[in-house]
C-alpha cells in the first residue's frame, strides 16, 4: 500500500513543506509540497534527502545503560527509576546548580523543550543551554537592550524592501528566510530592487549581488561604525524617524561626528567611494538587513550587532514595512532574562549570564564542569542535540563529560555524545511523532505546522516529551490527577479544559506541572505528550497571538485556541494562524521608552574606542597561524549533525579544506591532496579544495561533519579546531575568525 503524506522538513529552521510517500510502512519518496503556504513548493536538496535522516544505521531502539566501556539494554522502568534517583541524590547533596539541561534546539521539534525545562525548574536549576546561546547570545542581548526583550527578533520584510543587505549571510546556501534562493534571485533580477552583500568572500549570494563589499575578515564592527559616521557627517540620518522612534541618539551621535571613516574603510580593505555610495542608498531606499553567523560568530560579535542595529535605527529601518520588522509568534523563542536582574543566575566558573533569551552559551559548559567550584556542574541532561559535534572545542567537551557524575542523552541515534553517556534513551523521530517548531518567522502572517506521525516508531521508542513525563512522574513532580479529569480527556476538548482548570484552581501544584498533566490526560489518549502540550499552549495563548489570530479569522472567544488547534489538524500542510497589524509594529517594542534605545552603557567604551589604528594592530595574526579559518561553512551538503549517512552526499566534495589559488600556490599545495589544518585547539586532516570563492588568507571548512558512521569517520569535525575559550564576552564562539595554518599532511 502506498500513500502520500503532507509534512515538513526537519533539517533546518525553515521547515519547508514536504510530501512523503509511505509504502508498506516505510518512507520511500519525497517531493516539495506546493500547498504549503510558507514554502510554496520549494525545498532544497536536504529536505529531498530526509529519508537518510529517518533511517540511520545507528538507530536506537531500546534504553541503554553504560557498563564500563559498553552499553547494555535495560527496561524503561529501570532507566527512569535509576535516572530519577541519581538526579535527586545529586541535587540533594550538591544543590540545584549541579544540574543543567541542554536541548531545545532541534530543527524538527520544540515542544519537548517545555517538558525538559519544566523538570529543570522543578529541581531548582536555571541552567538551560541551547544552540541559541551558541550562535546568538550577542544579538539577543543587544535586542533585549535596544528593543526591550531578548526574544524579539526583527526580521527582514523582504516582500516590501527595495534593497536587501546580506551582511555575513550566504542565503543561497543557508536559507534563513522562506524560499531564500528564490527571494535572493528575485532581488538580483529585478531592475527596481538591489541585492547588497557584505562578506569577505565571493559566496554564492555575493556572486549574484548588485553590490558586493568584500570586507576584510574581522572588521565588520569597524565598517558599520564607518558607515554610521559617513551618514552622520553627511547629514543623511532620518531625522523624523529618530525624533519619533529613537531614544538616546543625542548621547551616541558624538561617537561618529569626528570619526575617521576613510581610514576605517581602508583598514576594512574596501573602496571608500563604494562604501559612501552604499550609505547614500541606505538613506534613500527602503531596505532590510539580514545579518547571519558571519556577524554573530565573527570577531567582535556583540559589538557587530550593536553597530548594525544603530545603523538600521538612524536610517529608519526598524518596525516599518520594507525594513526589519517584529514578527508575530505562536510562542516566543525563550524568555527575557535581563542580566542586571539578580534573580537570573550567572554561571559559577565563568560568570556568564543567560542572555540568549534565557539560555546559557554552550561554549562555557566545559569550564563549568571542570571547575573545582563546590557548585560546579555534575549532571547534564542532553536532548535532541549532539554537543560533541555541534559545540566548540570537542576536546574540552570530551574531558568535561568524562568527569560528570551523570550524563543522560535522549536521541534517535548512538551519537558521539551518546557514546559518553551513562544512560541513552531512544526517541521517536519527527516523522514518528507529533511535533512542531516555533522558528518559522514570517511577516505579517503568523505560520505554524503541526506535523503528525507518518510512519510507526520502533516499539520501545518514545517521544522525548513522553520520556520527560515519565521522569517527572518518578520524581513526584506531578500532582495526583482526579479520575474525573482523566476520564474527561476522552471526550469533548472544551469540556475537558473546563474540568481541568476547575481542578487546577484548587491544586497548588497543577500549573507548574501543566505540561505533564496534559501529557498524562490528553497525551495518553493521543499517544503524544507534545500534541497535548500544543493544545494547552493554544488554549492559554498570550494576548498578542489571540489578537493576531482574530485578524486571521479566528474569532476571540473562549474556543479560539481549540479552533486553531483543530484547524492545524485539518491542514497538515501548515497554515496562517495569525496576522500582525503592520501599522502597529512599533507598538511591539518593549523598552521603557517605547522607542529604540540606542544607548547600551556596557558597550559605550568599546564603541567609542573602536578606530582604524587600534583595529589594524589587533588584526595582526601570529606568525604560527598566518591564515583565518572560517569554522562552519554553510553548504548544500551539510545539515548540522542530522544527516549521518554519508550516502546522501555520494559523489560530492562535501567536506573540504577550501583555500584560494594564490594561497595554495604559495604553500605548494594542489587541489585534492590531503592537508593538515592546525589551530590553537588542535589539528585535523582533510582534502584540499582550491576555490575562487575563498578570499586569500582565509580557509573554509563546513560544519556538521566528522561523524562516526559504522566504523568510519566521515569528514572533518571542525569543532576539534575551535577553542571554547575563543569567544565573545557574552559567550558566542568566534568561529568565523580562528587563526590557523595549513600544510601538507
Image (tube, rainbow, N blue to C red):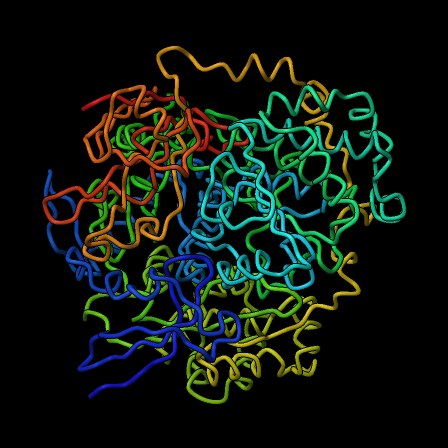
Q: Can you give x and y, in whole percent of width and height, for residue 557 in the image? A: 68, 82
User: Residue 545 falls in which quadrant of the image?
Assistant: bottom right
Q: Can you give x and y, in whole percent of width and height, for residue 108 in the image? A: 39, 61
**Vertical arrangement, residue 99 with respect to residue 288, above or below:** above
Placement of the C terminus among the 4 image quadrants: top left
Q: Can you give x and y, in whole percent of width and height, for residue 405 in the image? A: 27, 35
**Vertical arrangement, residue 624 with respect to residue 60, above or below:** above
**Closer to us: 221 or 732:** 221
User: Residue 464 falls in which quadrant of the image?
Assistant: bottom left
Q: Residue at x 66, y 78 (%)?
A: 552
Q: Residue at x 73, y 34 (%)?
A: 276
On the question of residue 520 being in view, the answer is no
Q: Residue at x 54, y 86 (%)?
A: 495
User: Residue 227 falls in which quadrant of the image?
Assistant: top right
On the question of residue 118 being in view, the answer is yes
**Vertical arrangement, residue 661 with respect to residue 434, above or below:** above
**Closer to us: 173 or 578:** 173
629 to the left or right of 551: left
130 to the left or right of 240: left
**Numbered label tally:** 0
Placement of the N terminus among the 4 image quadrants: bottom left
**Closer to us: 561 or 245:** 245
Q: Can you give x and y, in whole percent of width and height, for residue 154 in the image? A: 65, 52
Amino acid at each position: 500500500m502506498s500513500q502520500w503524506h503532507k509534512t515538513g522538513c526537519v533539517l533546518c529552521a525553515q521547515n519547508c513543506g514536504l510530501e512523503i510517500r509511505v509504502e508498506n510502512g516505510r518512507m520511500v519518496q519525497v517531493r516539495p509540497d506546493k500547498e504549503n503556504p510558507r514554502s510554496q513548493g520549494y525545498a532544497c536538496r536536504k529536505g529531498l534527502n530526509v529519508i537518510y535522516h529517518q533511517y540511520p544505521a545507528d538507530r536506537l531502539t531500546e534504553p541503554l545503560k553504560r557498563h564500563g566501556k559498553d552499553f547494555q539494554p535495560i527496561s524503561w522502568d529501570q532507566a527512569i527509576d535509576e535516572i530519577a534517583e541519581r538526579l535527586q541524590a545529586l541535587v540533594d547533596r550538591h544543590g540545584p546548580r549541579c544540574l543543567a539541561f541542554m536541548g531545545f534546539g532541534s530543527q524538527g521539534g520544540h515542544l519537548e523543550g517545555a517538558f525538559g525545562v519544566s523538570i529543570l525548574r522543578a529541581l531548582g536549576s536555571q541552567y538551560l543551554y541551547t544552540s541559541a546561546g551558541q550562535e546568538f547570545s550577542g544579538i539577543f542581548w543587544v535586542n533585549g537592550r535596544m528593543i526591550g526583550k531578548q526574544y524579539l527578533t526583527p526580521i527582514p520584510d523582504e516582500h516590501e524592501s527595495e534593497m536587501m543587505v546580506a551582511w555575513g549571510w550566504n542565503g543561497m546556501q543557508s536559507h534563513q528566510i522562506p524560499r531564500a534562493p528564490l527571494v535572493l534571485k528575485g532581488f538580483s533580477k529585478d531592475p527596481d530592487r538591489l541585492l547588497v552583500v557584505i562578506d569577505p568572500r565571493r559566496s554564492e549570494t555575493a556572486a549574484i549581488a548588485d553590490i558586493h563589499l568584500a570586507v576584510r575578515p574581522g572588521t565588520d564592527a569597524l565598517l558599520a561604525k564607518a558607515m554610521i559616521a559617513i551618514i552622520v557627517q553627511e547629514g543623511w540620518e532620518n531625522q523624523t524617524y529618530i525624533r519619533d522612534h529613537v531614544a538616546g541618539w543625542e548621547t551616541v551621535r558624538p561617537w561618529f561626528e569626528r570619526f575617521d571613516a576613510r581610514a576605517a574603510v581602508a583598514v576594512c580593505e574596501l573602496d571608500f567611494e563604494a562604501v559612501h555610495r552604499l550609505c547614500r542608498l541606505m538613506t534613500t531606499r527602503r531596505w532590510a538587513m539580514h545579518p547571519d553567523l558571519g556577524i554573530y560568530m565573527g570577531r567582535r560579535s556583540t559589538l557587530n550587532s550593536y553597530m548594525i542595529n544603530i545603523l538600521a535605527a538612524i536610517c529608519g529601518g526598524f518596525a516599518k514595512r520594507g525594513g526589519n520588522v517584529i514578527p508575530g509568534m505562536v510562542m516566543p523563542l525563550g524568555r527575557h532574562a535581563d542580566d542586571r536582574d539578580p534573580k537570573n543566575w550567572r554561571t559559577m566558573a565563568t560568570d556568564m549570564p543567560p542572555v540568549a533569551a534565557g539560555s546559557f552559551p554552550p561554549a562555557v559548559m566545559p569550564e563549568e564542569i571542570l571547575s573545582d567550584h563546590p557548585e560546579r556542574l555534575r549532571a547534564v541532561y542532553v536532548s535532541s542535540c549532539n554537543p560533541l559535534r555541534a559545540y566548540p572545542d570537542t576536546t574540552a567537551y570530551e574531558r568535561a563529560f568524562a568527569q560528570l557524575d551523570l550524563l543522560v542523552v535522549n536521541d534517535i541515534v548512538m551519537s558521539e555524545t551518546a557514546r559518553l553517556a551513562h544512560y541513552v534513551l531512544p526517541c521517536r523521530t519527527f516523522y514518528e511523532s507529533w511535533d512542531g517548531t516555533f522558528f518559522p518567522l514570517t511577516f505579517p502572517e503568523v505560520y505554524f505546522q503541526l506535523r503528525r506521525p507518518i510512519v510507526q516508531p520502533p516499539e520501545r521508542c518514545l517521544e522525548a516529551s513522553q520520556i520527560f513525563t515519565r521522569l517527572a512522574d518518578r520524581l513526584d513532580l506531578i500532582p495526583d490527577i482526579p479520575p474525573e479529569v482523566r476520564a474527561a480527556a476522552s471526550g469533548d476538548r472544551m469540556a475537558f479544559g473546563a474540568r481541568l482548570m476547575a481542578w487546577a484552581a484548587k491544586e497548588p501544584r497543577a500549573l507548574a506541572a501543566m505540561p505533564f498533566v496534559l501529557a498524562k490526560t490528553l497525551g495518553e489518549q493521543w499517544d503524544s505528550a507534545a500534541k497535548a502540550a500544543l493544545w494547552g499552549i493554544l488554549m492559554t495563548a498570550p494576548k498578542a497571538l489571540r489578537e493576531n489570530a482574530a485578524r486571521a479569522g479566528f474569532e476571540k472567544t473562549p474556543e479560539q485556541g481549540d479552533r486553531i488547534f483543530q484547524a492545524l489538524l485539518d491542514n497538515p500542510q501548515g497554515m496562517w494562524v495569525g496576522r500582525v497589524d503592520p501599522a502597529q509594529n512599533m507598538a511591539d517594542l518593549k523598552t521603557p521608552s517605547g522607542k529604540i534605545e540606542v544607548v547600551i552603557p556596557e558597550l559605550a567604551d568599546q564603541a567609542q574606542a573602536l578606530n582604524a589604528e587600534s583595529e589594524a594592530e589587533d588584526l595582526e595574526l601570529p606568525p604560527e597561524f598566518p591564515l583565518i579559518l572560517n569554522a562552519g561553512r554553510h553548504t548544500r551538503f551539510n545539515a548540522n549533525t542530522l544527516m549521518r549517512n554519508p550516502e546522501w552526499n555520494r559523489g560530492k566534495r562535501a567536506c573540504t579544506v577550501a583555500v584560494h589559488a594564490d594561497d595554495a600556490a604559495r604553500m605548494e599545495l594542489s587541489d585534492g591532496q590531503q592537508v593538515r589544518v592546525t589551530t590553537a585547539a588542535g589539528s585535523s586532516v582533510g582534502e584540499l579544495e582550491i576555490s575562487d570563492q575563498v578570499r586569500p588568507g582565509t580557509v573554509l571548512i563546513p560544519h556538521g561533519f566528522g561523524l562516526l558512521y559504522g566504523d568510519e569517520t566521515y569528514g572533518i569535525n571542525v569543532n576539534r579546531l575551535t577553542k571554547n575559550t575563543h569567544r565573545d564576552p557574552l559567550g558566542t564562539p568566534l568561529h568565523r575568525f580562528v587563526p590557523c595554518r595549513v600544510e601538507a599532511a
